[in-house]
């Protein structure tokens, strides 16, 4: 298995808990209101796309990395994904009571992850530029 295949597998592994926790957080089937299920079925694909967008970005960037540069991306994936997945678990699974604002983590953390992925990619581009300047 190549380095980039490993990176993509790690990215997919990190994206799965996000989608599972998102589905768990939605829980429209526990509601007595049939409208909740309709709203959830309409909104879920859009919110899911937003929540996994940083993972998709990281997967696209993994295809652009080569050689030793790829290790930066492989090392950054757990650093970017683990805290967010832990906060998702803490907010939705381990919490005694769900607060109404807990769902906002799906609005805020993908933005944090996207910035972190772009920062790692910026570091990789910086390394490429330094390497080109030395030659």
Image: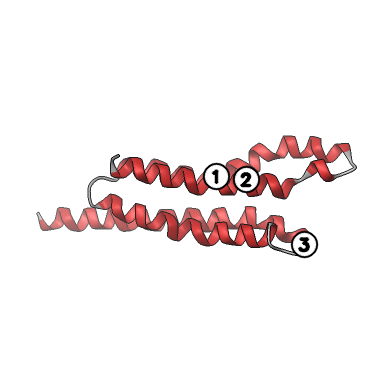
- Estimate how packed mark 3 is, as few (under 14), some (14 to 19) or many (20 or more) residues with alpha carbons within 10 Å: few
* Measured Cα–Cα span from mark 2 to mark 3: 19 Å
Helix, strand or loop under label 2? helix
Mark 2 lies on residue: 20
Which residue corresponds to the image point at 56% horizontal and 53% vertical from the top-left?
A: 110
The foreground one among 63 and 6 is 6
Report if the CB atoms under discs 3 and 1 are less than 8 Å apart: no
Q: Which residue is mark 1?
A: 16
Residue beneath the point at 72% across and 63% down: 95
Q: Are marks 2 and 1 in contact (CB under 8 Å)?
A: yes
Quadrant in the picture for the N terminus:
top left
Is 111 on the left or on the right of 94, as rendered?
A: left
Figure quadrant of residue 123: bottom left
Task: Give the numbered dot on residue 99.
Answer: 3
Tell me where residue 75 appears, x and y as whole percent: 36, 57
Answer with the quarter of the image where residue 38 lies: top right
Q: Earlier in the sequence, mark 2 or mark 3?
A: 2
Q: How far apart, in angstroms, are the residues tagged by discs 2 and 1?
A: 6 Å
The residue lying at 28 percent from left, 41 percent from top is: 2
Disc with the residue nearer the chain's start (3 vs 1)? 1
> What secondary structure is marked by label 1?
helix
Colouring scheme applied when the structure was drawn: secondary structure
Real-space CA distance between mark 3 and mark 1, rounded to the nearest whole angstrom? 23 Å
The image shows residue 94, relative to residue 26, as above or below, that is below
10 Å crowding of disc 1: few (<14), some (14-19), many (20+): some
Quadrant of the image containing the C terminus: bottom left
């Amino acid at each position: 298995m190549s380095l980039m295949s490993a990176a993509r597998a790690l990215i997919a592994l990190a994206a799965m808990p996000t989608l599972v926790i998102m589905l768990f957080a939605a829980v429209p089937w526990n509601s007595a209101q049939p409208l909740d299920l309709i709203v959830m079925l309409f909104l879920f694909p859009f919110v899911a796309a937003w929540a996994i967008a940083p993972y998709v970005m990281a997967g696209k960037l993994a295809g652009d990395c080569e050689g030793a540069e790829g290790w930066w991306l492989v090392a950054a994936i757990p650093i970017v994904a683990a805290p967010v997945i832990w906060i998702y678990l803490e907010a939705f699974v381990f919490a005694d009571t769900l607060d109404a604002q807990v769902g906002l983590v799906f609005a805020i953390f993908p933005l944090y992850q996207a910035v972190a992925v772009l920062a790692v990619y910026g570091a990789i581009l910086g390394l490429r530029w330094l390497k080109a300047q030395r030659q």
